[in-house]
Image (tube, coloured by chain):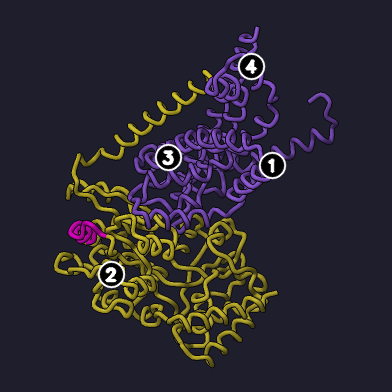
Chain colours: A purple, B yellow
Amino acid sequence: MKNLSATSKAYLVFVFVVLYAPILYLIFYSFNSGGTMNSFESFTLEHYKAVFEDSRLIVILLNTVIVALLSGLIATIIGTLGAIGIISVKNKKMRNTLLSLNNVLIVSPDVVIGASFLILFTMIGIKLGFASVLVSHVAFSVPIVVLMVLPKLLEMNTSLIDAARDLGATKRDVLVRVILPYISPGIFAGFFMAMTYSLDDFAVTFFVTGNGFSTLSVEIYSMARAGISLTVNAISGLVFFITVLVVVGYYFINSRSKSTGTEGHR
Amino acid sequence: MRELIQATIAIVIACALLFVVADQMQSTGSKGSANTLTVFNWGEYIDPELIDKFEEETGIKVTYETFDSNEAMMTKVQQGGSAYDIAVPSEYTVESMKEDDLLIPLDLSKVPNLNNIDPYFLDLAFDPGNEYSIPYFWGTVGIVYNPNLIEEHLTFESWDDLWDASLKRKVFLVDGSREVMGMGLNSIGESLNAKDDILLRQATDKLIELSPNVKAIIGDEITPLMVNNEAAVALIWSGQAADMMWENEELNFAVPKEGSNLWFDNMVIPKTSKNIDGAHAFINFMLDSENAAQNADYVGYSTPNKAAMDLMDPEVIEDERFYPSEELRDHLEVYENLGLEWLGKFNEYFLEFKMSLR
């Protein structure tokens, strides 16, 4: 921060205000006893109480978190191995093709992905519900993980692997003891990206929910017709709080692993 | 490597715990009955207590899902994959679902509470004899306005008030070809189902005269604008108007006397149903006067249930803006299925009107 000029500081503050103001505004009104977002009357926790009393909403919230965590985990495993696979392709043309294919999935519209999943699932007879949502979330998260892990792999010096080989490491040892530890920051970043993608995805999820399984984004969207109540503010506040917790947790894991990491190399 | 494994284990354990909690919460209320019912309804369109009450009374476990548009609902029913036992489409969707063979005919002997429904709302053109559908809530299309932001003489008893010169750039319209074209046709004294090029031409010309007054043609964003006193006049459905008026008491709603649209949302049993008896039981339960009154009280839309109206707050029932008198109701029309060709023409004329906006 010290070497930033006054203008850059002001700009930075501006950016953060733009990013956070809507969320804080929304959370602020979740404590409003007035029942609307027009004017703040007095402080109340009744909207939070309403969330906890509506067991259907809580189940949906839990489902959303479960899907986010699990799909993030599975996508991270697949994506990491995929990235290692792509990087080990020596043919430049082939590698670029694979990367482009990966990027196409990131830029293709959610609606298209959602509709194709719906058609696929109904065609092969998978019942819509938890499994279908999980599978589609894993699918659209994998390319993101690949993209997060790749830079770490690219910056890794290949002589590290050669050295390990020379010292008698098997293929498995190289993967587990050299590559994975080196790229683990990328892996964690990939996991958190995948998780946030899963949390806020509406379009794909909308197509593949069914049989009583729903996620928060779909549920909130369907409330639009009859009017969104402050309960939605409260639940959004809760989600924001959970996300902050996860990020703080990630920060601690990160800083701890860094300190143990240096000790290990002594 | 160790922290990768630790993190993985932590995530798996967290998921397992959350899963157990969610499962526990889902199964409370009705224990271990294989008898389930999946209800597919608009968001915020039922009092959740009624679901609990239904589960207690019948022992049937209800899975409740929501949708946000008729088209989305129909797509999911068409695709199969989820066993919906009850859906609540609007009247024109009932018609197209019927045409696409997506509905199961009702066994009216299993819904004795049908007697509670006002006969005015039964046996309508979109479903003669109520073979497939039973009305759930109904409403009109009208004008919501903020008396503080417009001149006093405007009461919107007639559509022509919208054309008043004092409303320059103050009118919001919903983005629906049938609603707007219907208003145009009504304002020249014609049926909103008119399949006649000359009439549609006249209606469009009249609408184009309105264009200096039109501020925007939008959707759900009208609600916050009206509530926050940022908009003066809007063409909107009565249900949405009721929401606005509940949040902002200044607002008023009027259905012009030349006529307007009468809309319905209806309970139907889609072809995907696996519990047809349960679905009938649910419909009958919702038609019960006490339950219907409780539901109308919670949702705030107009109920077609005559017996329920006797149990409700007389102030609500006597509000002619939402429960129009029979005399006024005679001027209301239900949308007929226009068919693709005429629907296309409605859209074309609506587009022409939109393009006339400056």
Q: Indicate the amino acid at tag 3.
A: Leu
Q: Secondary structure at mark 4?
A: helix
Chain for numbered disc 4: A
Dots 1 and 2 on the same chain: no
**Camera-nearest residue between B123 and A167:** A167
Gap in angstroms between the C-alphas marked 1 and 4 = 26 Å
Please, what is the three-letter code of the amino acid marked with disc 2? Ser
Q: Residue at x 57, y 82 (%)?
A: B349
Against B102, residue A71 (above or below) is above
Residue B323 shows up from this direction: no
Pointer 4 and pointer 2 on the same chain: no
Q: Quadrant for the C terminus of chain B, please.
A: bottom right
**Few, some or many residues within 10 Å of mark 3 (<14, 14–19, 20+):** many
Helix, strand or loop status at disc 1: helix
Residue neighbourhood size for the residue with mark 4, other residues' Cα within 10 Å, grouped as few (<14), some (14–19), many (≥20): few
Amino acid at the residue labelled 1: Lys
